[in-house]
């Protein structure tokens, strides 16, 4: 053991640069994995992020106005409370949109369940009619700080002072009221149903059900009107983040695999560079087991040092990284499970490195004590016929020899290309995800959202009057009348959405991924969710019941349906009128001119109709994926770091192997500059091959993954969109030129080595 430690110490002193690279490579990989964990927690669990930042309540209890809610603060297991606060139900309107709300009286932000302001300011006693809106409600009303809200049926107005996020259940039209914070005096002047609300933060979150039972027993079952436990709220909030979870889970596994290959490549390259030293150790009496232990102890120590360094730096400085990545680390540090991940990721990395090193060290233990001398053939062997023909065509010899050097040793060359291609492949997938989300935002008509606004008119207005009034707005290019009803399919316990949009003369422009538009009588298009639910396909007939009326439709196409999980079947309004001639439109889908602002048009329509129009923006699934853009950028940065580490390893191996060919290259008359060009060309060719492989595999993989997710979510396949050819060309050029630039300096230094040093390297 003493001899082993002495040799390890001597090797460390002799090869400090290599040891430092292994430590830094390990630190970079562990830091990359920790950042990936932070991004995963930040993006896939926004509710948990808000809950941690707001010090949210584990259970929110609504009671009647006469209940003594203060008693709940004395329950065992209750750490802190928010309230009780007076509440009143009401309705508010903004820009033509209406929403049922719960006004909650407060003066100062509560310590428990504290709203997280994202714009504007908190309530001010100097502004008696000021309110703060929960963020989902603000989006539904298109309201921003400074806007004025109206209370339908009264002359009362409210001023929006701020918009805040909350960990409580979010606004859902027709199902759950939106949350509005107001001064207690404003709540008292609201004519709606009154009550109280109190939030309880528990010592043990798992005791929520027991605490609720005790609260109901203490106050009486008639006093409690609604209970919102944190588990239910979290499940509702996380329901829309499945895409984020799947995409980031894939990237996490891919980053782990890329990091594993990078570590394996770095260690294998270093051990190949020490074959002469291993032979010397064998010659002086070291056993294979001792050789294995030497390298295993060395690299485990390097890995442990790098992992500790990465963990300390990430924990101390990670939140200071500019942009979304720093925000993600700051939020992740406050989420449950952060400490466990901070310990588990470095430990897993060190154990994996130990396993990888053990395999490479076992191979080192099999090196013979007297290795055969390597023939002084240029660049690893005889030139291929293609290389000789290229030289015969007077192509620059450094380019030909560099290309030959990159692909002579096929197993090693293929391994280097594979290690470099994996991070590039994942970057291409990330770019495809970005492009798809951008398509959702900029071209919603291509994913089933041709209309920008939905208008519901007062029943006193006729269809002709509504359509004429809507068409007067110069920004409205088309008005499609329609109805949407719930239909029951025989043998199913749930319902589907049956829509009649447009007419035979003016059909609605559905986005079709399969089949053809519905033109004839009884023809319809359906979403993927409905096809899966009924186990049918395009070309089949389906029967459903609307009330007591049967409806039989022929599915002639599959449309992209972002709403209702794709469980939608759509036909023309004329087709539905065949069963019910008195059927009149209940909604109108409006298409706007390119570049028109939907908020402005909605305000104009509501103002012109004097409150008889209820105008809403058509929900875009991309609105819930806005955070994914910043996360994609962070993931690309993480993958680029892993790619850089792997690239440096590949360059180091290429330069080290080139030292053995240095005498041969100088013997045939190449100058140091030409020898440098050989190494740079070899690195560039390897990078180019990796780019081609990563792009060729990444594009179909990205389309498959995105379309698979679209199919499972009910929208349907056909939503994937890859990066433009120009962007891919720019990406590939940057990767190849960057690799060549990184290889230039070490290649130049190696080309200027003394002949005596070169003789020692090949001896």
Image: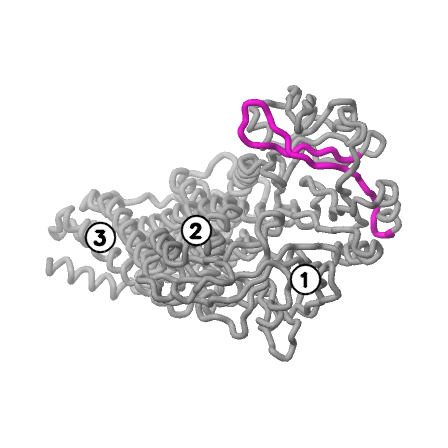
Q: How many marks?
A: 3
Q: Position of residue 386 (x, y in %)?
A: 52, 36
Q: Which residue is mark 2?
A: 665
Q: For the N terminus, which image quadrant?
A: bottom left
Please determine whether, in this image, residue 185 is positioned above or below residue 379: below
Q: Which residues are magenta?
A: 473-502
Numbered badge on residue 169: none
Q: Main SS of the magenta segment?
A: strand
Q: Nearer the viewer, residue 305 or 613?
A: 613
From the viewer's side, name the closer residue of 682 and 717: 717
Q: Which residue is mark 3?
A: 296
Q: Give the class, few, some or many, for how many residues have Cα within 10 Å of label 2's Cα (few <14, many ≥20).
A: many
Tell me the element at label 2: helix
Give whichever of discs 2 and 1 has the lower sequence position.
1
Residue 524 at x, y = what percent? 71, 27
Verify CB contact (< 8 Å) between mark 2 and mark 3.
Answer: no
Chain-order first, disc 2 or disc 3: 3
Which one is in front in this view, the residue at disc 2 or the one at disc 1? Answer: 1
Residue to which mark 1 is pinned: 143
Mark 2 or 3, closer to the camera: 3
Label 3 element class: helix
Quick one: 652 or 569, which is closer to the camera? 569
Residues under labels 2 and 3: Cα distance? Answer: 36 Å
Badge 1 local density, few (<14 within 10 Å), some, or many (20+)?
A: many
Q: Residue at x 26, y 56 (%)?
A: 299
Identify the residue at image location x=62%, y=35%.
Answer: 718
Q: Considering the numbered disc 1 on the image, is that residue within a helix, a strand or a loop?
A: loop
Residue 13 belongs to the span the image colors magenta: no
Dividing the picture into quadrants, the one containing residue 478 is top right
Q: Is residue 475 part of the magenta span, yes or no? A: yes
Q: From the viewer's perspective, is 207 left or right of 432?
A: left
Quarter assignment of residue 415: top left
């Amino acid at each position: 053991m003493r001899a082993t430690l002495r040799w390890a110490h001597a090797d460390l002193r002799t090869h400090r640069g290599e040891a430092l690279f292994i430590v830094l490579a390990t630190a970079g990989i562990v830091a990359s994995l920790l950042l990936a964990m932070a991004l995963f927690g930040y993006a896939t669990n926004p509710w948990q992020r808000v809950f941690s930042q707001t010090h949210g309540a584990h259970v929110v209890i609504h009671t009647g106005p006469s209940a003594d809610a203060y008693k709940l603060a004395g329950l065992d297991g209750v750490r802190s409370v928010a309230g009780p606060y007076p509440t009143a139900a009401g309705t508010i309107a903004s820009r033509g949109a209406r929403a049922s709300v719960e006004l909650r009286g407060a003066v100062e932000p509560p310590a428990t369940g504290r709203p997280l302001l994202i714009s504007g300011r908190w309530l001010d006693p100097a502004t008696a009619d000021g309110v703060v809106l929960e963020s989902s409600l603000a989006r539904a009303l298109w309201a921003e700080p400074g806007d004025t809200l109206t209370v339908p049926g009264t002359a009362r107005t409210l001023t929006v002072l701020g918009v805040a996020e909350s960990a409580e259940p979010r606004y859902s039209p027709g199902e759950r009221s939106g949350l509005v914070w107001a001064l207690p005096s404003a709540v008292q002047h609201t004519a709606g149903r009154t009550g109280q609300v109190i939030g309880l933060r528990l010592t043990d979150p798992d005791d929520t059900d027991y605490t609720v039972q005790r609260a109901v027993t203490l106050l009486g079952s008639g006093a409690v009107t609604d209970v919102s436990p944190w588990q239910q709220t979290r499940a509702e909030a996380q329901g829309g983040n499945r895409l984020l979870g799947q995409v980031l889970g894939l990237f996490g596994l891919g980053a782990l695999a890329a990091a594993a290959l990078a570590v394996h490549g770095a260690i294998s390259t270093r051990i190949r560079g020490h074959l002469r030293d291993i032979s010397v150790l064998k010659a002086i009496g070291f056993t294979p087991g001792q050789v294995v232990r030497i390298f295993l102890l060395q690299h485990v120590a390097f890995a442990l040092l790098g992992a500790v360094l990465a963990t300390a730096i990430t924990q101390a400085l990670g939140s200071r990284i500019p942009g979304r990545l720093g925000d993600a680390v700051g939020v992740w540090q406050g989420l449950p499970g952060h400490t466990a991940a901070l310990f588990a990721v470095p430990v897993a990395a060190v154990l994996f490195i130990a396993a990888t090193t053990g395999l490479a060290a076992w191979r080192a233990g099999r090196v013979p004590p007297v290795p055969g001398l390597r023939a002084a053939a240029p660049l690893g062997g005889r030139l291929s016929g293609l290389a000789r023909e290229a030289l015969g065509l007077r192509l620059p010899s450094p380019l030909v020899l560099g290309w030959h050097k990159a692909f002579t040793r096929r197993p090693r060359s293929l391994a280097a290309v594979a290690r470099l291609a994996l991070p590039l492949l994942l970057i291409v997938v990330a770019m495809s995800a970005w492009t798809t989300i951008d398509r959702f935002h900029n071209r919603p008509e291509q994913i089933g959202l041709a209309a920008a606004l939905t208008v519901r008119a007062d029943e006193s207005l006729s269809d002709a009057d509504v359509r004429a009034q809507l068409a007067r707005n110069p920004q409205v290019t088309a008005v499609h009348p329609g109805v949407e009803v719930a239909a029951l399919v025989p043998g199913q316990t749930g319902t589907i959405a049956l829509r009649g949009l447009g007419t035979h003369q003016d059909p609605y422009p559905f986005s079709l991924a399969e089949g053809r538009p519905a033109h004839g009588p009884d023809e319809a298009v359906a979403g993927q969710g409905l096809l899966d639910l009924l186990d049918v396909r395009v070309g089949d007939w389906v029967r459903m019941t609307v009330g007591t009326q049967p409806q039989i439709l022929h599915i002639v196409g599959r449309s992209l349906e972002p709403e209702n999980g794709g469980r939608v079947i759509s036909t023309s309004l004329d087709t539905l009128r065949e069963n019910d001639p008195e059927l009149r439109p209940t909604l109108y889908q409006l298409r706007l001119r390119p570049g028109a602002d939907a908020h402005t048009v909605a305000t104009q329509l509501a103002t012109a109709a004097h409150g008889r129009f209820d105008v809403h923006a058509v929900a875009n699934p991309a609105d819930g994926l806005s955070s994914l853009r910043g996360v994609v950028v962070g993931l690309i940065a993480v993958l680029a770091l892993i790619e850089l580490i792997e690239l440096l390893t590949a360059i180091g191996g290429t330069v080290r192997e080139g030292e053995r060919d240095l005498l041969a290259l100088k013997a045939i008359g190449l100058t140091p500059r030409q020898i440098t060009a050989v190494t740079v060309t070899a690195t560039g060719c390897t990078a180019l091959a990796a780019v081609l492989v990563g792009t060729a595999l990444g594009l179909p993989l990205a389309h498959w993954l995105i379309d698979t997710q679209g199919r499972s979510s009910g929208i349907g396949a056909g939503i994937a969109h890859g990066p433009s050819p120009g962007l891919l060309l720019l990406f590939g050029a940057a990767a190849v030129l960057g690799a060549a630039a990184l290889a230039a300096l070490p290649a130049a230094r190696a080309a200027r080595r003394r002949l005596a040093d070169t003789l020692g390297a090949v001896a």
